[in-house]
Amino acid sequence: MRKNIFKITAIFMIIALFLCSCSHGQGSIEIKEKSVSGNIRAGDGIAVYSYEVDYPKIKLPGNKEVSKAINANIENEIAKITEPAFDYAGQYDDWISRGVPYVSGASYSESFEKTYCDDEFISFEITLYCHEACAMRDTEETRGLTLSLKTGDTVSVYDIAADGAYFREVMFAQAEKQLLDFGKEKDTEDISLEDAFTIIDRQSFEWYMTEKYVYILFAPGEAAPIMLGTLRVEIPLGELTAQPSNGSTASVSGVSS
């Protein structure tokens, strides 16, 4: 059977973290596994929201400032679920005041997996599992995070594309082909190419890369119903590093097209 790059795999609340050191121009990058967990409680002590995150703590040899910037960006990802905007305690109090039986609290689990690392960049696939108490459903979302090992900043796919205009067209073409194939495989017409193209055009997608591919991600509900999860478009890394029309030799360090 043809490999399904959109396959949504089952996930447990605690996910094993696959992290290790990788080489760097100034030595080996130290990546330590860290975890944080907690909850939010209503006034009567009932836990209405809980979370658990496995994440990397990165130390670059001889460069404390860049290490600090990288870890700050990772912590920003963690803060998205540890400091929820939704008032879960307020929801609980409302249910109780109206005599509505409280079913269960919302819970989240997040993990980082290192997928790429060279002298310039480190990339992570981030898996987020969510149990929404109010909607009585479980969802899984995939995010991406790529960081510069030179500055510590987050990196856009266009920052490292040898030819941004060319790669944009590749994304359009591959999104159309792969999303349509996915719709046929799932026997659904609820795939919006228009929404996918808008997301690409606005550069509002998340992404990560591996040694062979760049994965462009469409979050649940963006280009298809939420129940279909995160949709991924898989693009060979060589398309990212293709020789630009202006003759530049820009490429991803250590990767040949």
Image: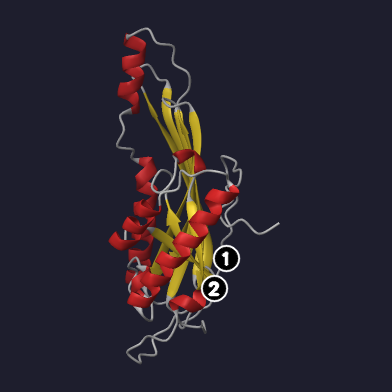
Which residue sits at x=37%, y=85%?
244
Q: In which quarter of the image is the N terminus?
A: bottom right
Q: Mark 1 points at which residue?
A: 20
Which residue sits at x=39%, y=67%?
147
- Expressed as whole percent of the image width and height from the top left, the position of residue 185 reads 60, 49
Q: In the displayed image of the protein, which residue is found farthest to the top?
A: 99
Q: Which of 1 and 55 is in front in this view?
A: 1
Q: Nearer the viewer, residue 231 or 250?
A: 231
**Amino acid identity at mark 2:** Cys
247 versus 208 height, above or below: below
Residue 41 seen in the figure: yes
Q: Give the left or right position of residue 190, taking residue 7 as reference.
A: left
Which residue sits at x=44%, y=41%?
225
Residue 150 seen in the figure: no
**Is there CB contact under 8 Å for labels 2 and 1?**
yes
Category of crowding for the residue at label 2, using alpha-carbon neighbours closer than 10 angstroms: few (below 14), some (14–19), many (at least 20): some
Q: Nearer the viewer, residue 20 or 111?
A: 111
Q: Name the residue under label 2.
A: 22
163 versus 52 height, above or below: below
**Count of residue discs:** 2
Real-space Cα distance between discs 2 and 1?
7 Å
Q: Give the left or right position of residue 18, taking residue 122 as reference.
A: right
What element does badge 2 sit on?
Answer: loop
Tag shown at residue 91: none
